Amino acid sequence: MTTSNRSLPVPYSPAPPPAGEQGLSRAVWDELYSIQQALIELDKPTAMSVRTRLDFGVTTAASWQRILVGGTPSLERPGGVWDSTTGTYTCAQEGYYQFICTAGIWSFTTPATKEYFAGLRGTLTPSSGAPRIEYAFDGGIDSVPLTCLMVLFVQMRKGDQVFFDATIVHATKTGTVDTTFTLQVVRTSSL
């Protein structure tokens, strides 16, 4: 440290860190634990991606069907958050999450050149409280492929669940159409 004729040097000697749990308060231990968890999370963000392609039912009135059942994630971190038998995502770590669900409907094999629409319904079922339901719709002519997109940004707690349903409604046709469903999940930050 440099000195001048106007100041005197002030010696700085920090105290040694406390040894053992006796020297730290509960608040300090809690803060150290929070820092440890944040450092662990930096290297392992929560993320998942799952995709299915199938012949999806087309009706003349809205009929919601669960999607992504049987889908195997191409990315699932941490493991065990996706239940392929029910098409349900279960939150493993609280935070803010972004869900991007798409339905890609290929053009009808025998188009009637009629209008149709596709809908996605996302349901967030918290571990306590009432479910939150969101909808997204898009429409077009059956001779042209269509993409319906839903983006959810939600606060989740451990144990909360999210699942998606879809419907395809045509003016005159029933049957099935080749459809690809994709779900991407990422935890954007802690609470």
Image (cartoon, rainbow, N blue to C red):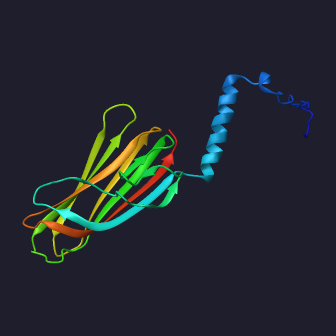
* 144 w.r.t. 9: above or below: below
In-image side of 29 versus 170 (left or right): right
Residue 162 spot, x, y in % from top left? 37, 46
* 81 w.r.t. 105: above or below: above
Asked whether 10 or 33 is in front, the reply is: 33
Residue 188 spot, x, y in % from top left? 49, 49
Q: In which quarter of the image is the N terminus?
A: top right
Q: In which quarter of the image is residue 138?
A: bottom left
Residue 136 spot, x, y in % from top left? 25, 54
- Residue lying farthest front? 85
- Residue lying farthest left? 172
In-image side of 19 versus 61 (left or right): right
In-image side of 69 versus 142 (left or right): right
Residue 3 spot, x, y in % from top left? 91, 37
- Residue lying farthest bottom? 110
Q: How many marks?
A: 0
